Amino acid sequence: MSADEMRERLQAAADDLVASGAEAGLQVAVTRHGRMVADVTAGRAATHHGHGGPTSTRHGHGGPADTRHGDGSPAGARRGDGSSASARRESPVESSTLFYAASTAKGVASAVAHVLVERGELAYDLRVAEVWPEFGVHGKDGVTLRHILLHTAGVPAPPYDTTVEDLCDWEHMCAVLAKAEPWWKPGTRFGYHAQTFGFLLGETVRRATGRTLSWWLREAVTRPLGVEDEVHFGVPEPLLDRVALQEPPIGPPPAEPEPGSPADRAIPPGIRSDAAYANRADVLSADVYAAGTMTARGVARVYAALLGDVEGVRLVSPARLGAMAAVQYEGMDEVMGFPTTWAFGFSTYRPGDGAARSGSTFGMVGMNDSAAYADIDSGVAVAVMRNRFGGGLEALSRIGRIVNDAFPSRGHSG
């Protein structure tokens, strides 16, 4: 299959998914060997024209080192969903439309950490307590950057009464996590750190380098690649009007975790994601780092630059790339309660039915079924953004099959 044929099939699939009602709006971007080979959009997206509402005085990062976004806009949390001070408008999805991508941003956060190690700013075996002394209590003095990236740090849960306002308060969240008792000895078990990952990684980076993860994302990754307005943790206020509002799923919402279970404790009721949560201006503009907002073409370009050269920009060495994608853990997720396979800060999941060599595919899927991933053997990076919150993996699966047919990984072709 040629790239043109793949692009036509992707457009037809995206249009069909929208026409069926399964999707409201979609972006699909595919790069191969650093070159964009598909940039597909379909459907419509509503946005808020003129976000308003009061801004919190509690800053997104805290401390004097870096309390502003890379573009100079405040990094503080915002209150409310912005709907009371803005008018809803609807327009066709464009390549520049920003989509809330939930945990797809964890892959971006991990990528930034690996870039910082590549640059000598961090080390995988850096003990967090060396730069964040308050964290080194209750047996957490042995937690390292490696443990954070591998979700083995043992701090997967914020306090059970955490609210969205708490989550958007950087200083508060770091303080409560510093005091937390670990669920297990660091490094001995795996459990997905759904909400705490971003604070553990972000505060470690800030303490160790004097700059926030958002600053490094912009200066070391997105600005060199020309996508600084397209891949974000917290969205700068001038860009909030470009964010597609998430639409509720057509069917029933997903089942809640069993009360008292590890998953219930790790993602408290007050901060569970749905469309309304994802549309809040405070959530969108806060640097939580476990979630983010982006375009498909922007994040695909980031993954392309992890794979290799993109117009003179290569983010990591070939050796580090191999280490990032290598399987680090296979077994039970102690928090989510199911078997999993994990690379060095990334999921190994490859959407569709295309097999891949172990250690070739790495990326991340978000709670709202957005995704961004790359495959070393085929040289392909893929991103899918959507504004129908939840609803299953049909779009990812269909798109993944088309990409796999065009550019099979080594495992797919046997």
Image (spheres, rainbow, N blue to C red):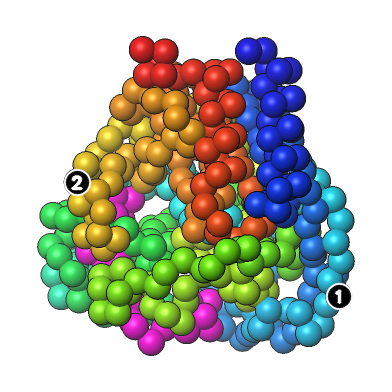
**Residue type at numbered disc 2:** Gly
- Image quarter of residue 142: bottom left
Marker count (numbered): 2
Q: Which residue is mark 1?
A: 87
Q: Secondary structure at mark 2?
A: strand
**Residue type at numbered disc 1:** Ala
Indicate the position of residue 154 as horizontal and vertical percent values: 22, 64
Q: How many residues crowd mark 2 within 10 Å: few (<14), some (14–19), many (20+)?
A: few
Indicate the position of residue 344 as horizontal and vertical percent values: 33, 41
The quarter of the picture where the N terminus appears is top right
Magenta-colored span: 145-169
Is 194 drawn above or below residue 115 in the view shown?
below
Q: CA distance from mark 2 to mark 1?
A: 48 Å
The residue lying at 57 percent from left, 35 percent from top is 398
Indicate the position of residue 177 as horizontal and vertical percent values: 32, 75
Residue 139 visible in this rendered orientation of the protein: yes
Labelled disc at residue 331: 2
The stretch drawn in magenta includes residue 150? yes
Q: Main secondary structure of the magenta part?
A: loop
The residue lying at 46 percent from left, 82 percent from top is 270
The stretch drawn in magenta includes residue 151? yes
The quarter of the picture where the C terminus appears is top left
